[in-house]
Amino acid sequence: MASRDVVVGSRIGLHGRPAAIVVKTAAAQRVPIKISTKERPPVDASSIIAVLALGAHGGDTVTITAEGEGAEGALDALAEVLAQDLDAEPADA
């Protein structure tokens, strides 16, 4: 099983728009991804309700895990998104 610890880059954490972007990225991967915090057990990273329920704030460390062929690449993709400030306005806005 592949695993990564990532610091949440969004100031407001995994709420609203940032959570939706994380969920969309996780759902696009070929392997299931789980996400957890120190306080909460792993949940399906492609479930908006589950990700919101984690209550992860900006600066918190989350752990993402995946298993199977392509797990490392899937975690790389999700880690890159999680580390960004997803609260910032898109460049084309």
Image: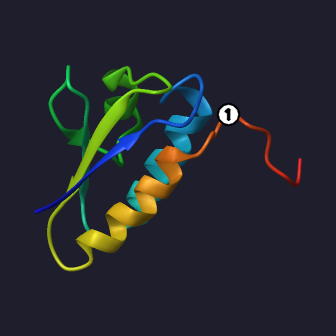
Residue 29 coordinates in the image, percent (x, y): 37, 67
Drawn side of residue 92 relative to residue 64, left or right:
right
User: Where on the picture, by quarter, is residue 12?
Assistant: top right
Give the image's coloring scheme.
Answer: rainbow
Quadrant of the image for the N terminus? bottom left
Using a 10 Å C-alpha cutoff, classify the residue at mark 1 as few (fewer than 14 neighbours), some (14 to 19) or many (20 or more).
some
Specify the farthest residue to the right.
93
**Quadrant location of residue 55?**
top left
Residue visible at 15% across and 73% down in the picture:
68
Residue 15 visible somewhere in the drawing:
yes
In this rendering, position of residue 43 left or right of residue 14: left
Most extreme residue toward the left, as rendered?
Answer: 1
Q: Residue at x 35, y 73 (%)?
A: 73
13, above or below 2, in the image: above
Extreme-bottom residue of the structure: 69
Residue highlighted by disc 1: 87
Q: Give x and y (percent) for residue 14.
A: 48, 30
Most foreground residue, 13 or 43? 13
**Could you tell whether 41 is left or right of 14 in the image?**
left
Look at 46% across and 36% down and name the residue there: 8
Vertical relation: 70 (above or below) 87 = below
Number of residue marks: 1
Looking at the image, which is closer to me, 29 or 40? 40
**In this image, 92 relative to 84: left or right?**
right
Residue 37 image point, x, y percent: 25, 29
Residue 76: give x, y in percent of width and height: 39, 65
Dot 1 falls on a residue whose secondary structure is loop
Residue 30 visible, this angle: no
Looking at the image, is 86 positioned above or below residue 59?
below
Q: Amino acid at mark 1?
A: Asp
